[in-house]
Amino acid sequence: MSASEKISDLTGKARIRNAALHLFAVRGYANTSLRQIAARAQVSLSLVTHHFNSKDLLKRAVDQAVLASFEQAIDSVLATTMRSVDEVAARMAAALGEVIATRPEVRSYIRRAVFDQVAITDRSLMERLLELMDATLARMYRAGILRRDAEHHWRPAQMLLLTFGPVVFDWLIKPHTPEVANGDALRTRCHSGLRLLMQDLSTPAGSPHYGSDSSGARVNPS
């Protein structure tokens, strides 16, 4: 099952969530009503409020669905044995790029998350994505794939920018273009950035790679 399929199914609750994702991405959170979401999901307004109670809680559910798609992509990479840091970067870029490249509403939603200041009572999507990058790097540090350096507090933000920069900054550089670069270009740009970061943090030549930790990340240097 592709990453795009993992955040969509046929249940009423999921249809509501996916309708909200689309409308929040296109119209923005402030300009979208629960009634509009119900209409797009082809359900009653009462069913929307039954499942999510409020637009704030619905946005949290949308954020969690988007976050989960990236978590699953990362897990799929770190659960396999890889022979080099470049292979880690390539697989990570391919997995994250699958979500970014095949879900235009996710791309638009991430842009909105960067530029729209939405007053909600939970952490923002970007804060949660930053935490995911931090946790991902920590797994690779523990597994011996990457070394922790003096700037390790900055590295999660760097990984976030390198992963999602092609989505955000392509739009800034070419504001009149309705969509960002195609899927292959996004994957290539993501790989280029992650490869630079991971090579910078790779274990020095000649140092041993240690066994996997409980999270399952492994590198086989032979």
Image: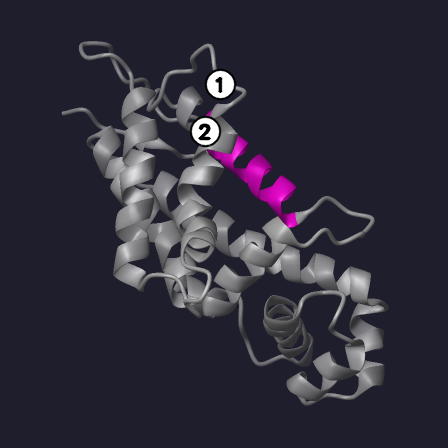
Q: Residue at x 50, y 56 (%)?
A: 69
Check contact, mark 2 vs mark 1: CB within 8 A. yes
Disc 2 marks a residue whose amino acid type is: Leu
Residue placed under numbered mark 1 in the picture? 152
Residue placed under numbered mark 2 in the picture? 137
The answer to whether residue 139 is left or right of residue 66 is left
Residue 152 screen position, x and y as percent: 49, 18
Residue 28 screen position, x and y as percent: 67, 66
Categorize mark 2 by other alpha carbons within 10 Å: few (<14), some (14-19), many (20+): many
State the quadrant of the N terminus.
Answer: bottom left
Name the foreground residue: 164 vs 8: 164
Residue 68 screen position, x and y as percent: 55, 53
Instruction: Look at the numbered disc 2 and give the secondary structure of its residue.
Output: helix
Magenta-highlighted residues: 125-138
* Residue 1 visible at all: no
Categorize mark 1 by other alpha carbons within 10 Å: few (<14), some (14-19), many (20+): some
